[in-house]
Amino acid sequence: MVGSLPLLALVVIAYNIIVFLTGLTMDTSVFAVPLVSGTVWTVTIGDILLVFGLLMLFLELINATRTGSATIINHALSMLVLLVALVQFIVLPQFGTSVFFLIVLLNILDVIAGFTVTITSARRDFTVSE
């Protein structure tokens, strides 16, 4: 059952924990890196969360190539995570940020790509003999 858990749910859960338990915002600076150009690159909590989300999306796309009942459960749970994230974005003021909008967009891409990759790989497995 753990294999069917959508990994992007971890990103949504992390956002919820940061907003509700710590009280930090996505603009809170984590560290700064001076660049050769003389500018300072400031990395925020939102930046780290988006990088984490991109990594989870990559892993979800790899997982979508598998076939089986766990994959179908994963797609259904991914759709549920998308719906929860979309409702949070629309209804809750703490979630009306660009960072969370991009997290919702990552979830949309996960759902669409997951179904597309699974259908494509299932078509290759399905052969009709004469």
Image: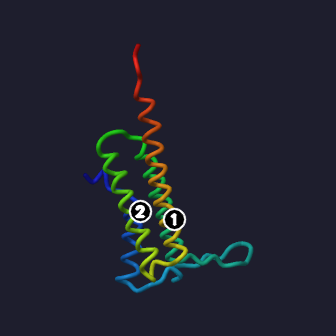
Which residue type does callout 1 highlight? Val
Q: Which residue is mark 1?
A: 51
* Above or below, 104 relative to 111: below
Q: Nearer the viewer, residue 45 or 41?
A: 45
At x 31%, y 51%, the residue is: 4
Q: Nearer the viewer, residue 28 or 57?
A: 57
- State which mark lies toward you, 1 or 2: 2
* Above or below, 129 relative to 41: above
**Among the 4 quarters of the image, the one containing residue 34:** bottom right
Q: Which residue is mark 2?
A: 82
Is 75 placed left or right of 55 in the picture?
A: left
Q: Nearer the viewer, residue 93 or 44?
A: 93
Q: The C terminus appears in which quarter of the rendering?
A: top left
Which residue type does callout 2 highlight? Leu
Q: Secondary structure at mark 1?
A: helix
Residue 14's x, y, as percent?
Answer: 39, 71
Q: Nearer the viewer, residue 39 or 121?
A: 121
Are circles 1 and 2 on residues that touch, CB within 8 Å? no
At x 42%, y 80%, the residue is: 92
At x 44%, y 36%, the residue is: 121
Residue 107's x, y, as percent?
Answer: 46, 60
* Above or below, 11 relative to 58: below
**Among the 4 quarters of the image, the one containing residue 111:** bottom left
* Above or below, 72 relative to 20: above
| Earlier residue among tags 1 and 2 | 1
Going by the picture, which residue comes out furthest to the bottom?
23
